[in-house]
Amino acid sequence: MEAAARAGRRLQGRRLLVTGGSRGIGRGIVLAAARAGADVVTCYRTPGPAVASLEQELARTPGKHQVLRADAADAADVDRLVAECEASGDGLHAVVNNAGAFRPTPYADLGDADWAATLQGNLTAAHLVTRRALPLLDTGSSVVNIGSTVAFLGMAGGVHYTAVKAALVGMTRSLARELGPRGIRVNTVSPGRIATEALDDMPEADAERERRMFSSFTALGRLGTVDDIARTVLFLVSDHAAYVTGQNIHVDGCV
């Protein structure tokens, strides 16, 4: 993540809203953006050690950062979250829709509730946050949606997740066309298999087996890192990407 801050894409004076920032890819984006000079607002759904440690890291990083409790899939929570951003009067330079999760389920066992929860948590959440934050975005700002390469590859046991991530790509493309005249760019970043703390939480033998297996699928022979994703997001929200919009950028080591 330090590398992202040294990459020449300084974000001094910019303000980012990153949803789901306490763990994994979201956490990597939050810390990389803060270290690159941005003021970062992020949210989490469930309190815990990850939230506390993020608050501590951000407190040691120059800038005005906020870590707020809000569920990006809940309209009332999103209203409150964006109202906090609005209260400062500084507007937003970027929104990163990272929040989302799913539970692998064979299609034959996929119930209506699981389908609806996956839609709400991954696609509707991005819609709620983007629509509510839109008045705070101005010319030169951007929206980055975190997708997944499963939208291209497919995944057994993940029909519901694949469907919503594919829909996110279509949403991105259409929003890019609609918001382009206002000078607002919209892109998707689609990670492949990324090494996060979820692997560290597994038994060591299982984690090593997964690392070897998924590394073998990529042209680069390794798993991605949260820094790989964070660098791409920082590029997209910077002036270096001023003519990049409507794109779905795969960061997957070529699977």
Image (cartoon, rainbow, N blue to C red):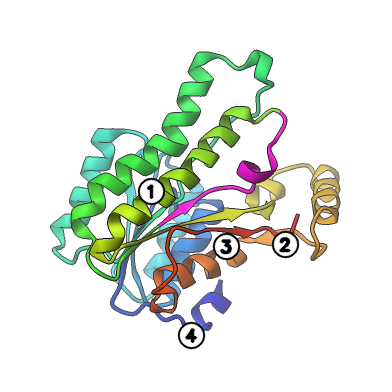
Task: Specify whether residue 174 is painted magenta.
Answer: no
Instruction: Determine contact: label 4, label 2, CB under 8 Å.
Output: no
Residue tagged 2: 253
**For the residues marked 4 and 1, what is the alpha-carbon distance in whole angstroms?**
30 Å
* Three-letter code for the amino acid on which mark 2 is drawn: Gly
Of marks 3 and 2, which one's residue comes earlier in the chain?
3
Callout 1 secondary element: helix
Compared with 118, 193 (above or below) is below
Residue tagged 1: 174
Residue tagged 3: 229
In this picture, residue 172 sits left or right of residue 161: left
Indicate which label's residue lies in the foreground, 4 or 1.
Answer: 1
Task: Specify whether residue 147 is painted magenta.
Answer: yes
Of marks 3 and 4, which one's residue comes earlier in the chain?
4
Few, some or many residues within 10 Å of mark 1 (<14, 14–19, 20+): some
Q: Quadrant of residue 184?
A: bottom left
**Residue 194 image offset from top left, x and y in percent:** 67, 54
